[in-house]
Image (cartoon, rainbow, N blue to C red):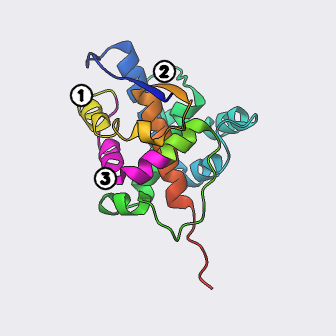
Amino acid sequence: MIALFVLAAARVFSNTPENVAIQAVHNFGACAVSRTPQGARELLASDYRAADFQARMRAYLKGHARCMPFNGAIGSREVLFAGSLAEALLKADVRRSQLPQRIAFDPQRAVIAARSPAEEMALCTVFEAPQATARLFETQPATSEEDRAVSHIVDVLPRCLKKQTQLTLNTPALRSLLALAAYRIVTTPRKATP
């Protein structure tokens, strides 16, 4: 049995607190990357599920108060923040026109070991749908454009899940997982030729 549920249907796109929070995390990640891209690269070189990731993330976040457009605090699940960093790095490091080619399957690229069933699904999805994935990253989070872009990816997802796997994702989590997978793909070197 393969079951995948993407919870995106019937979203209302307005300035709801949830949509504003999703966009704030995304914008904060983009701002942080614009100020300290190397720190973001070093953070993403580690596994966001690792025990020390939160401490490393808090260390990275220090000094980025300017990225907060108001006097407040921002909170996010690690995968959402890590995904916002990955997406911002992809936009900074890869030309928009080259992204689909760079994230497509390349037999010359070194093998990327998935660290979880969700990451395995995300890597497979990016390889199977590089154009649709790149188009997703061109949209603003929590918008109808994002939902339309996700609709082009949803058909690929069941093919990328192992049998007997169930996965429930909302659109922000799916986008983050795809961004992290795409970033891992782009940063994985090609195999050395003999």
Could you say whether the residue bearing mark 1 is in a helix, strand or loop?
helix
Q: CA distance from mark 1 to mark 2?
A: 29 Å
Q: Is residue 188 left or right of residue 142?
A: right
Q: Which kind of residue does numbered mark 2 sit on?
A: Asn
x and y percentages locating residue 101 in the rendered image: 37, 63
Q: Which kind of residue does numbered mark 3 sit on?
A: Gln
Reading the image, the residue beneath label 1 is: 144
- Residue drawn 36% across and 53% down? 130
Q: Is residue 95 magenta?
A: no
Q: Quadrant of residue 31?
A: top left
Q: CA distance from mark 1 to mark 3?
A: 19 Å
Circle number at residue 131: 3
N-term mark: 1 or 3: 3
**Front one among 141 and 29:** 141
Q: Are marks 1 and 2 in contact (CB under 8 Å)?
A: no
Q: Are marks 1 and 3 in contact (CB under 8 Å)?
A: no
Residue 25 in sight: no
Instruction: Give the magenta-colored segment's residue range.
Output: 124-141
Q: Is residue 104 left or right of residue 192?
A: left
N-term mark: 3 or 2: 2
Circle number at residue 71: 2
